[in-house]
Amino acid sequence: MTVNLSTGAFYERATRQVSTLRAQAETLQQQIGTGERLSRSSDDPVAAARLRSLARSERLAEIDQRNSDVATNDLALTDNALGSVANLVIRAQELATRAANETLSGEQRLSIGTEIANLQQSLLLVANARDSAGHSLFGGQAAGAAYELVDGAYAYVGTAVKDGVDLGEGQSVVPALTGPEVLSLEVDGVQTDLFAVLGNLAAALQGEGDQTAASRDALAGLSAGLDKVTTGQTVIGARMGWVELMNERRVANSELVADEQQAIGGADLAATMTRLQEVTTVLEASQASFVRLANLTLFDMLR
């Protein structure tokens, strides 16, 4: 009976030892394959908690990056639209300067008036442009058009402000301008906008009255309008620079997070491979020893 108990204990100890070594080898192989030191939270609860915190930071950074991409696209659309408005105003200035020449014939001024009216329609198309989400680019939070024809004149129908886009770290950026921030202006103490300036000039050149004086008067409004557009371009350029700066900060933070994740949860491949070789050697030796001992009998000892 004693021999049977000792034999059973021998096999149990050998099996347990081999199983432990195999489990260690499999764990080390898994670490080499995944590059991660922890396979479960219980391996190192403190490190696992920190890794979860870093993972949450990564997910938040991804959301911030998507917001940043949207803001960048909308700011680029706004910048392009402002460039188009500036070109329209510059062309209108050229035409108004020509129309102010007293030597022009009535037919020539009529042609200029027609082109001015076309510029007003082009301005309407730009003012009612859409952002990356299909909403009004210059309409604030309005989903529809920013400007509509109201009582025979173009009027702003958007909201007063546009919400900012969260860039992370408590920072945000407004990805566009409202119509009045670009097109509304003041001439000689009178509030007006570029639509009215172009519309009045087109009507004067296509109608009766002192067309030369009307053309000269329009130049002041067009100059003020161009200044307003240029200011808008400066504002948008500054906002684009701010978004770019936040992107650079986000990339730098992401690299720091990745380094910390590697330091906390990453497997040291050189050390892990050395340890695997050591465990494998011990496992092979244990298996060989078990086979030899298992084959020994009392008769072998008596020889």
Image: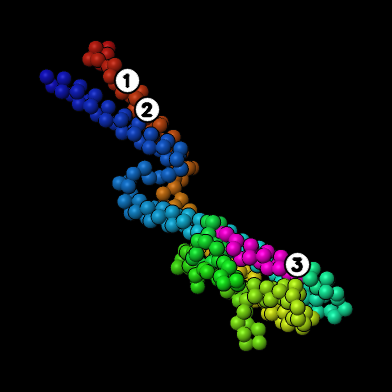
The residue positioned 27% from the left and 27% from the top of the image is: 15
Q: Is residue 269 above or below residue 256?
A: above
At label 2, counting other C-alpha atoms closer than 10 Å, the crowd grade (few under 14, some 14-19, many 20 or more) is: few
Q: Amino acid at mark 1?
A: Val
Pointer 1 and pointer 3: residues touching (CB < 8 Å)? Answer: no
Q: State which quadrant residue 170 falls in.
A: bottom left
Say which mark, if any, is on residue 115. Answer: 3
* Label 2 secondary element: helix
Q: Amino acid at mark 3?
A: Glu
Q: Position of residue 203 (x, y in %)?
A: 71, 74
CA distance for labels 1 and 2: 10 Å
Residue 38 in view here: yes
From the image, tell me which residue sits under label 1.
291
Q: Is residue 43 above or below residue 121?
A: above
- Magenta-colored span: 112-131
Residue 69 in view here: no
Q: Position of residue 209 (x, y in %)?
A: 76, 81
Q: Position of residue 147 (x, y in %)?
A: 57, 67
The residue positioned 68% from the left and 73% from the top of the image is: 199
Q: Amino acid at mark 2?
A: Ala
Q: Nearer the viewer, residue 146 or 233?
A: 146
